[in-house]
Image (cartoon, rainbow, N blue to C red):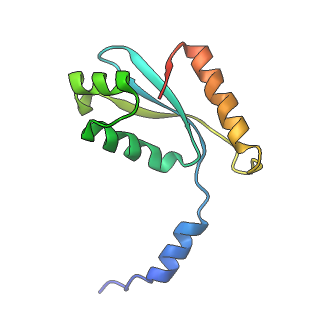
Amino acid sequence: MTKPIDRRAAARSYRERKADRGIYSVSCPATGERWFGASQDLEKIQNRHWFTLRQGTHPNRALQAAWNRHGEAAFEFSLVEILDSELNTLSLPRVLKERHAFWLTETGAKSV
């Protein structure tokens, strides 16, 4: 017999978790296109993009067009850089912006 789940403890644990923050990429190997983005919660960002792409409502038109042409199976999501978990919350937006700009410049890719 399995032990019942303590829902309150599970909810508390979820709220107290430290989300990984950093830079990610979405790529389409079929076309060689790659897009970079920054997120304060890397665990959830792929689901957010895939959902809007499946719905046909993604704000990045070039990414949506590539998705429509090649389909979900042609796309890859990868974590590029995870920031230090001890990074000051006040400096986080600035650091994410700087690292995102670095990867765009370094690779010549587009922004998500």
Q: Is residue 1 above or below residue 68?
A: below
Residue occupying the point 64% across, 24% down = 101
Q: Is residue 105 above or below residue 46?
A: above
Residue occupying the point 38% across, 46% down = 47
Residue occupying the point 32% across, 29% down = 75
Residue occupying the point 29% across, 23% down = 65
Q: Position of residue 33 (x, y in %)?
A: 39, 17
Q: Is residue 32 above or below residue 100?
A: above
Q: Position of residue 9 (x, y in %)?
A: 52, 80
| Left or right for 102, reference 87 | left
Q: Quadrant of residue 30?
A: top left
| Left or right for 41, reference 101 | left
Q: Position of residue 35 (x, y in %)?
A: 46, 24
Q: Position of residue 43 (x, y in %)?
A: 48, 49
Q: Quadrant of residue 27?
A: top left
**For the N terminus, which image quadrant?**
bottom left
Q: How many marks?
A: 0
Q: Quadrant of residue 26?
A: top left
Q: Is residue 25 above or below residue 21?
A: above
| Left or right for 18, reference 67 | right
Q: Nearer the viewer, residue 61 or 29?
A: 61
